[in-house]
Amino acid sequence: MADLCVAAVGDVHASAERGEHLARAFRGLGDEVDVVLLAGDLTTHGLVDEAAALADACREVRPPVLAVLGNHDHHSERADEVAHALKGAGVTVLDGGHVVLEVAGMQIGVVGTKGFVGGFPGAEIADFGERLLREVYAETTRQVDALEEGLEAIAGCERRLVLLHYAPLSDTLVGEPEGIWAFLGSGRLAGPIGAHRPDAVFHGHAHHGQSLGAIGSVPVYNVARHVIDTDFAMVRL
């Protein structure tokens, strides 16, 4: 089976001022890239003009571009408009869904969802107490269920990828203050990943974390722009 070349990045925090840099970065993707993954925090404040700068850059590329939104993209309560701007440039924006692509002579299944907070074994938010805390737990449950359903749907694909914003494990958070790990992801997201064993997981959000972790045999890449220190992480599968 042929290799699959993935170009991935999160936390680009697009703005009109960064538009020229983004355009150069996307134009610079080589012909070997088969798919581009954007792991959330695509904008700075979740504004449409910021999304438009990234959308213009995405028009420059040949391979399919898939994205999930992050917390920054929700900040101004205009996430639907941000997604619409990106979709207008041909970007597939996943929000708890999946897509199957014919790429590099094979079927590639990608499950994408934002993920959410909650912490990791030993320090997790429980489904107990005040209603607001239980709502946080319920939102993470919805994200976990979306992962499960998506991974089940793409089970027959030759390559299976997961795209998140929030981290599904603590390995890639090392370097961030432990006191904020509960706000950077949830270990509950690891359940469907460990059960279905996709080929790779990509996330962002942890700007000072580590670039690589693993859930069992599944590699997990933190592709936050601040971590990879380049425009795109190139991963061959």
Image (cartoon, rainbow, N blue to C red):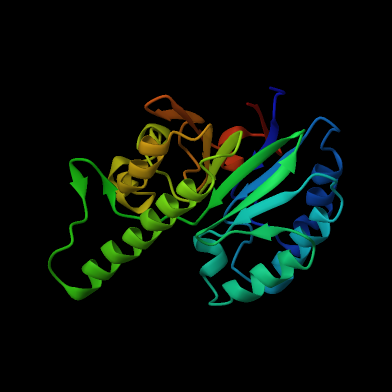
**Nearer to us in this view, 149 or 66:** 149
As drawn, the residue found furthest toward the front would be: 156
Would you identify the image quadrant in which residue 168 lies?
A: top left
Instruction: Locate residue 21 relative to residue 183 in the image: left or right.
Output: right
Q: Position of residue 6 (x, y in %)?
A: 68, 35
Q: Residue at x 71, y 66 (%)?
A: 50
Q: Residue furthest left?
A: 129
Residue at (70, 46) in percent of width and height: 101
Q: In the rendered picture of this protein, how many numbered marks are placed on residues?
A: 0
Vertically, is 33 above or below 76? above
Quarter placement of the N terminus: top right
Q: Position of residue 57 (x, y in %)?
A: 81, 54
What residue is at 85 percent from the left and 46 percent from the top? 62
Q: Position of residue 218 (x, y in %)?
A: 45, 29
Closest to the observer, 4 or 114: 4
Tell me which corner region of the image, top left, top right, bottom left or bottom right, holds residue 131.
bottom left
Residue at horizontal 56 percent and vertical 36 percent from the top:
227
The quadrant in which the C terminus is found is: top right
